[in-house]
Amino acid sequence: MSATGVFMIVPSALLSALIWIVLLAVLLYAARVPVHRVVLSASRGLHRAFRMGAFSVQKAEERIAQRNREVLLAQGREAAERVATGACLVQLYTGLIYRGPTTARDINEGLLALLERDGFDSVTEAVGADLD
């Protein structure tokens, strides 16, 4: 039996094609509601997965931002300790090499936060002061 013979419902090829088209249309019409439910369910699952992923990324971003604030504060604290011991100048060569040009800004922000916390208006006032 040939492949065309499998699809022949009646001896006429045109009539067989018409019958197959009608059967396919009826089948697709009957399957529209279950297929719609499957597509809707899949889209809901993807929506939840994307929302959960976005939430995870947001929380990770918040944790990284908090960690960066703590690191900046630690660097500022280190600079503040040196100022408290009487230093007027802090070298940044190693930090610039390993962390890049934003190192100076990061240390400056941390130092300013500590100076504000301790009530100093400038670094000059804090030189030699006790900054516990």
Image (tube, rainbow, N blue to C red):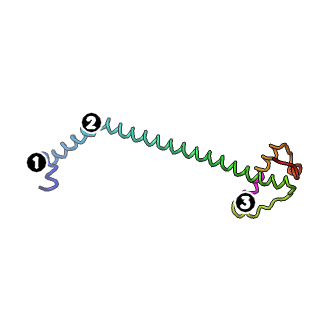
- Label 3 belongs to which residue? 101
Q: Which residues are magenta?
A: 101-108
Please tell me which residue is depicted at 44% across the width and 43% down the height of the picture: 46
Mark nearer the N terminus (1 vs 2): 1
Please tell me which residue is depicted at 72% across the width and 51% down the height of the picture: 72
- Label 2 belongs to which residue? 30
User: Rounded to the nearest whole Å, what is the CA distance between mark 3 and mark 2?
Assistant: 66 Å
Residue nearest the viewer, comparing 86 with 72: 86
User: Residue 120, position in %: x, y?
Assistant: 86, 45
Please tell me which residue is depicted at 15% across the width and 51% down the height of the picture: 6
Mark nearer the N terminus (3 vs 2): 2
Residue 104 among magenta residues: yes
User: Residue 9, position in %: x, y?
Assistant: 13, 46
Residue 102 among magenta residues: yes
User: Rounded to the nearest whole Å, what is the CA distance between mark 1 and mark 2?
Assistant: 28 Å
User: Rounded to the nearest whole Å, what is the CA distance between mark 1 and mark 3?
Assistant: 83 Å
Main SS type for the magenta part? helix
Q: Looking at the image, is 31 positioned above or below residue 5?
A: above
Quadrant occupied by the N terminus? bottom left
Q: Is residue 125 left or right of residue 111?
A: right
Disc 3 secondary structure class: loop
- Label 1 belongs to which residue? 11
Find residue 39 and report its image quarter.
top left
